[in-house]
Amino acid sequence: MEKSFEPAQIESKWYERWEASGAFQPSGKGEPYCILLPPPNVTGTLHMGHAFQQTVMDMLVRYHRMRGFNTLWQVGTDHAGIATQKIVENQLAVEEKTRHDLGRDAFIERVWTWKEESGSTITNQMRRIGAAADWSRERFTMDEGLSAAVRKVFIDWYRAGLIYRGNRLVNWDPLLGTAVSDLEVNNVERDGHMWSIRYPVAGSDESLVVATTRPETMLGDVAVAVHPEDERYAHLVGKTLRLPLTGREIPVIADDYVDKDFGTGCVKITPAHDFNDYAIGQRHKLPPITIFTLGAKVNDNAPEKYRGLDRYDARKAVLVDLEALGLLVETKPHKLQVPVSQRSDAVIEPMLTDQWFVDLTSDVQTDGRPGGRKAITEPALDAVRSGEIKFVPENWSTTYTQWLDNIQDWCISRQLWWGHRIPAWYDEAGNIFVGEDEADARASASVAPVGTLRQDDDVLDTWFSSALWPFSTLGWPADGPVQNERGEVVANWEQDKIFLPSAVLVTGFDIIFFWVARMVMATKYFTGQIPFREVYINAIVRDAEGQKMSKSKGNTLDPLDLIDGIALEPLVEKSTRSLLIPQVRAKVEKRIRKDYPDGIPAIGTDALRFTFAALASYSRTINFDIKRAEGYKAFCNKLWNAARFVLMNLPEGEIAAPVDGPVTEAERWIITRLKYTLDYVEQHFVSYRFDQLAQALYEFVWNEYCDWFLELSKPALNGDDAAAAASTRHTLLVVLESVLRALHPVIPFITEEIWRELPVRSSLSAKNRPASMPDSSKEPLILECNYPRPNDYVADDTATAEIEWFKAVLSGIRRIRSEMNIPPGKAIPLLLADGDSGDRTRVAKFATQIAFLARTEAPQWIGAGADEPAAAAAVVGTLRVLIPLAGLIDLAAEKARLAKEIGRIEVEIKKCEGKLGNASFVANAPAEVVAQERQRINDWNTTLGALREQAQKLG
RNA sequence: GGGUGCUUAGCUCAGCGGUAGAGCGCCGCCCUUACAAGGCGAUGGUCGUAGGUUCGAUCCCUACAGCACCCA
């Protein structure tokens, strides 16, 4: 083995071997365990959030595979309708073309080409993370099979009356020219103005003043509303206003939506461009007036002079004209919430358009069939409320249920070309025909079409197809094998439906609505099953200061840069490449030069994964500190070197197990510790506490195996007791081999690499080979081994007590050495006084180890009453461990050290006495707590006695 | 306005009704034959504030403050 851990060398060779072994595919044996990968955008790249999430999934998948489950990690990508279309449109823009220049078919052809070019980027990056996924079943939401599922769901829901087409107010992105979901809209606080405008009452000298942040929309006003109990305006309700600039007459209406105390208490109502106003308009049966085109320019419903103006130019023109008329009462600065499209950053314009919706809100249809709330929404709510689906951490279920309780119908149509085209046709009379294809649509119709049929131009929301992921990827709705475009079988519902429900969904909280809820709806409706039993909501990865990672801040990290390392200049270049604003570029460059003056060191995949695990508590954010990752690279190196030590000390050939079990206490102790560690690990896998899991293994490897067992093995290996030496060699190997398997799900590469170096053909490893791999001629892989279980190991509490005693003695001597500045290499005399018979036995047993590890001469007992030289002392129970002062130690310093220790213990004793002296404590506290307190005070008093005796001896 | 979190060592975070912890950093001594990406040792916190419950509160309850995020 190399002298130190070199991640790049070992990572490169294992992934292909693993994949080629077939172990990533379901074994066909054991209980099914399935994880669905949240499909990333096909043209995306891997970011820290993906890397974290995928590490979590991979740990679970590898662990359960080693535990003998029939494991499937279902992977794939989604077509990301808007994002992908926009990328290709941007490419066309460079050629000074639009998608309309190409036409629909040629454009879609071009998107496919781009998908073929860039679609494997993210899946290849996943392989670098070590993702043990079944690539032979990789799917894409636009695959023929998944598209068939989309069509079937649309048609079935339509025929069940649960999908409808309607003219509704939707969030319209005027830049992209499509409706977007309310989930794709961010409300952003912006500085704006509040304008007060006077509306004259018709046939009177009176007037009203309305306040608005969007004065241009007055062109579409249909009313002014006041609160029904607002006395100031009661006499005007029912009267008519003359709408300035248009000359139209509009009524004053009363509606308790209005807040009397906000502004003037009068609200202009523009139903065609505001969601609240739309609702009021419907209540009062006021037809909306649309005043904008789909490109957010003023349309022909407005007075001629404003027509064709962009909405913001129209605002200026309206204000100028109102001012001229003396109707602009006030202008003041105002902070307002502006709806912004996540996809284009354009300000959303609510628009009345024809769209397709999934009904999620009606209880009963007019013909008596169940409405969407009963058929789709409530089953999805019940799945979580009943506990059938559990969120981890649990409180996210509140987020889920509250959203579903207040859900709106789902607008599923998008005015895009890239996506699943809606399987609906219109005849010349406007009748709708829905079906698999035109023929099916005709055949299923109850009326004869008038003239020719024309297919709907729109496509479905990408999330519509993602909602079907839990069952469409398993082959539904076909009932036999499903092939991909290369003719390979990728799914077979008949067999694969055993993977539904999947075990756990690992995903971010930000898509609980987008995706999680919709998967539950669709899966419940179409299969009658829940899509997954648990939902683990992973934390959001932020930078070391807790800031959100963003390219314009320059605090993003590319997981591959952490794995491979990157020099400063290339890092600056790639971080600023896509930034167009010079000030932002300069800021980002400055930050990167400050944060990473030497670039980013290569820490390797294993250390990155361990870091993610160690940070994965139930907290909702994790702050990624590169320093922490470097620490875990050191851990990998520690493990590596421990393995080197073990291998250096192993003989050639078979390593036989000692016939009567481990010979030494140290061996029985480390095996006990291993057993308990594995017990914790098992619990932490169940509770998804990867931080505690990582910590338990970290502490075992470093603080127990390396710090104590390896050190204790040195005197044993070099000692005279041949049986102890042989047994110790075996235990060194057994524990190392076990802990490698235990660590494999977290750090797969290094564990596979070291494991291969072990004498795997020995009886030791053969017994851990799973039944599924009986072929001994095949090169064994750790990833196919059984996961170590607590019951594979025997606890020995007596041995543990012995070693704890030994550690206390050794730590006492070390403390004296360190505090008295005795050089570590210098051998010192060691005397022992007092103590009981147990101490005598233990000293005899551990004499060699103590002398070796503490660098002392052989221990000498001082008889009771005999003269003692002045010495520094460590106290273990009643035993005094003495280092003579002569020539080594400063008497005054030792006295001061003792006094400090005595003081500390006196404080502890006072605390105990305080508790035990309190009658109500003794009366009310549980008996074992009182007993524990009595034990403590005894122990402290024993130690105190020994320390005082020692202080007295020093004079 | 509704909801959900968070506040513990210099930093990042665990923890928990009964002796306050880890990693990193800092300080001291060591290149001791697995590992200087290391070893040994030390320092460091009245657990956001104020009340309450309790024999006992960092932990449970209430209020408040500050900081995040989600929804309207």
Image (cartoon, coloured by chain):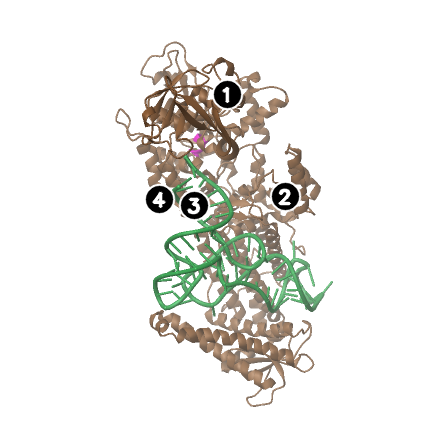
The mark found on residue A388 in the picture is: 4
In front here: A323 or A696?
A323
Q: Provide the residue designation for mark 2.
A: A561
On the question of residue A682 being in view, the answer is yes
Q: Provide the residue designation for mark 1.
A: A318
Q: What distance separates the C-alpha of mark 1 from that of mark 2? A: 53 Å
Q: Chain B hue? A: green
Q: Provide the residue designation for mark 3.
A: A29
Q: What distance separates the C-alpha of mark 2 from that of mark 4? A: 41 Å
Q: What amino acid does circle 2 point to? A: Asp
Q: Are the residues under badges 2 and 4 in a single subunit?
A: yes
Q: What amino acid does circle 4 point to? A: Glu
Q: Which quadrant would residue A232 be assigned to in this image?
A: top left
Q: Earlier in the sequence, mark 4 or mark 1?
A: 1
- Residue drawn at the location 69% of the way across and 74% of the way down: A826
Q: What distance separates the C-alpha of mark 3 from that of mark 1? A: 73 Å
Which contiguous range is marked in magenta? A463-469
Q: What distance separates the C-alpha of mark 4 from that of mark 3? A: 25 Å
Please say if A355 is above or below A647: above
